[in-house]
Image (cartoon, grey):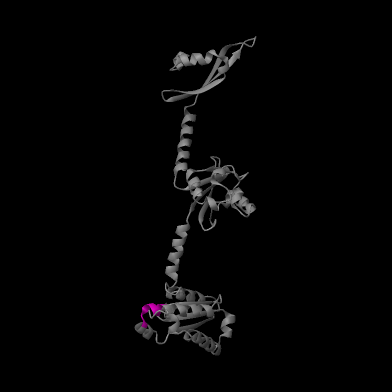
Amino acid sequence: MPALNKNPLHQRSLLAKSENLPHKARIRFGEEWLDHHIHPLPDSTGRISRALLVWAIATAEVAKAREEYRLLRMIDNMPVAVMTVDPVSFAITYLNETSKRTLGQIETLLPIKPSELLGASIDVFHKSPAHQRGLLSDPANLPHRAKIKPGPEVLDLQVSPVTGTDGSYLGPMLTWSVITQQVAAEARIHQLAHFDTLTGLANRNTFRERLEASLLKPAAQVALLFIDLDGFKFVNDSNGHLLGDKLLRRVADRLRLHCDASNVLVGRLGGDEFAISIEGGDVVEACRLKDLEKENERLRKAISDLTLEELIPKEGAI
């Protein structure tokens, strides 16, 4: 036995006392690893007089364990939040460190503390657990992607199936991230691309695209109204562009108020030019020339009721 141990005295002391047995250890010889198990062998009187050493080469097992540990550390430290779920009990079986940190940032919005999630049911995150369980239990439903909103935050959730070497379904893996700022930025970009920044109405491009889409529909019927403001240049020249902008916003508000049907679109084409499209058979049938003239007069009056006095602050002109 001394040949197998760097510290023979320690080994002898271990074997000399029967209460130390059984004993198991993993030792290294060069590039190889050995698992050895020492079992006590009692004689006919029950006295421990001998020990049985059983050993096996464990090099491949050690290499596998190291690789698994390396991969686990990589997943733990990767910048993406990862969570795994048991496909039968739907208990959370793993959260990486990024998940714990990210969930900690929105802890007040969660139904359970991040420190209590491991082992808890995934049901705590859903109002309809039955639907969620049906989705996660069948790998044919995966991959799946969704956006969820806990309070004011937006989470981007992706679920992928994890399979064994034989192709069997081991369970779902969830990766997710908080994308609240990204969603807000995308909404802002969409707003700038499709809507007039001054009035909030559809801009020229959006109005044209929506109009073209309406005209491409079978049996399309669309009514159009074009509006411009008489004397607007004089208002700008005599009172300044700030008051002119305020006037345009008030006109847009009046148009929105009087054109709030779902099949009516109001747009600002540019400057003091506005347009209104009315889509749909029932509306267009009602809006024949005479009725369109009435609608035009109604909108004209709503706009002409605006006075410069109500746009100019009491303390003086802009």
Instruction: Say left or right for 200 vs 48.
Output: left
Magenta highlight range: 239-245
Count how many numbered circles sit on residues in the image: 0
- Which residue occupies the extreme top position in the image? 45
Task: Give me the residue at 34% from left, 83% from top.
Answer: 237
> Is residue 17 or residue 275 the one in the foreground?
17
Location of residue 260 by image quarter: bottom right
Question: In this orientation, does residue 24 appear?
Answer: yes
Say whether residue 240 is magenta. Answer: yes
Identity of the residue drawn at 38% across and 77% down: 242
Residue nearest the viewer, comparing 45 with 180 = 180
Q: Which residue lies at the image location 51% right of the left edge and 52% below the top edge? A: 106
In the rendered image, the vertical position of residue 225 relative to residue 170, given as above or below: below
* Left or right of residue 169: residue 207: left
Indicate the position of residue 217 as horizontal and vertical percent values: 53, 75
Secondary structure that dominates the magenta span:
helix
In the rendered image, residue 149 lying in the magenta stretch gets the answer no
Q: Quadrant of residue 164?
A: top right
Quarter of the image with the C terminus in it = bottom left
- In the rendered image, residue 96, in percent from the top left (x then y), is placed at 49, 43
Q: In the rendered view, would you say 249 is above or below 74?
A: below
- The image shows residue 271 at horizontal and vertical percentages of 39, 79
Measuring from the top left, give residue 306's x and y in whole percent: 47, 84
Q: Residue furthest bottom?
A: 290
Closest to the observer, 112 or 65:
112
Q: Residue at x 46, y 79 (%)?
A: 250
